[in-house]
Image (cartoon, grey):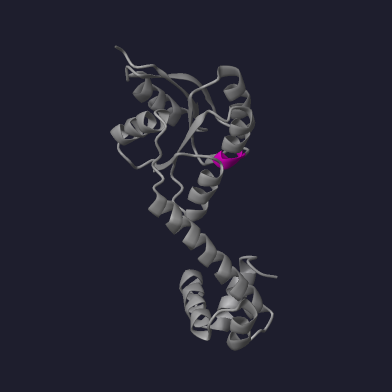
Amino acid sequence: MKSETTRVLIVEDHQVVAEGLAALINDQEDMTVVGHSGSVSESIARAAELKPDLVLIDFRLTDGTGADAATGIRQLRPETKLIFLTREDSDAARFAALEAGASAFIHKSRAAQEVVDAIRTVAQGGSLFTPRSIAQLLNNRREAEAQKEVLRLMAEGTSSRDIASRLGISYTTVRTHIRSLGSKLGVHSKLEAIVKARELALVE
């Protein structure tokens, strides 16, 4: 008995990439591409029109992010499955995809067979986001938010010990955050970190 065909909508603003994905997918017996769009607004309209089972989405689009497209699509068709296929490689992008309802986040450097396997897995109700990977994303997000708050208080002239008191964390934890911020910003002192953060508009 032949398996049911998975109807796929491709959301990708690079035509050559979209055509390559379409050829790969249409070459499979159990899946077919029903359409393509290259923007957030068009993808939502196409999803409403074509009613795909699964949407393969790039994260960077001409008028927003794939997370914007995914959110709009899920509002209209909550049953539609979502896979992000992108060159983005940040926790922020992964978390945005997860929040938008994605079941997988795949880097474009992965092999074609991995993309096909992911489509099959997700179409059948599976997810490539494991509980462990989700927990790690949540932990990284909390750490990033804590570091941002430490940076903000540093910019206000608050001492490390006062930062620890205000945030309810240990002085050692504050020092760890400061060292991590210095590494990320490529600086070697609190003053340099503040100057760099202001240059990057991370703090006022």
Q: Residue at 32% of width from left, 17% of height from top? A: 29
Is 125 in the magenta? no
Residue 137 lies left or right of residue 38; in this view the side is left
Q: Where is residue 173 drawn, in percent x and y?
A: 50, 79
Magenta residues, as a range? 64-68
Q: Nearer the viewer, residue 183 or 132?
A: 132
Where is the N terminus found, in terms of image quarters?
A: top left
Instruction: Decide if residue 28 is in sight here.
Output: yes
Q: Nearer the viewer, residue 164 or 160?
A: 164
Q: Nearer the viewer, residue 8 or 189?
A: 8
Instruction: Characterize the magenta stretch by its predominant secondary structure.
Output: helix
Q: Residue at 59% of width from left, 69% of height from top? A: 148
Where is the C terminus found, in terms of image quarters?
A: bottom right
16 versus 101 height, above or below: above
Q: Where is residue 147 drawn, in percent x and y?
A: 55, 71
Is 65 in the magenta? yes
113 versus 30 height, above or below: below
3 versus 9 height, above or below: above
Residue 87 lies left or right of residue 199; in this view the side is left
Q: Residue at 59% of width from left, 31% of height from top? A: 73
Q: Where is residue 127 drawn, in percent x and y?
A: 41, 39
55 versus 167 height, above or below: above
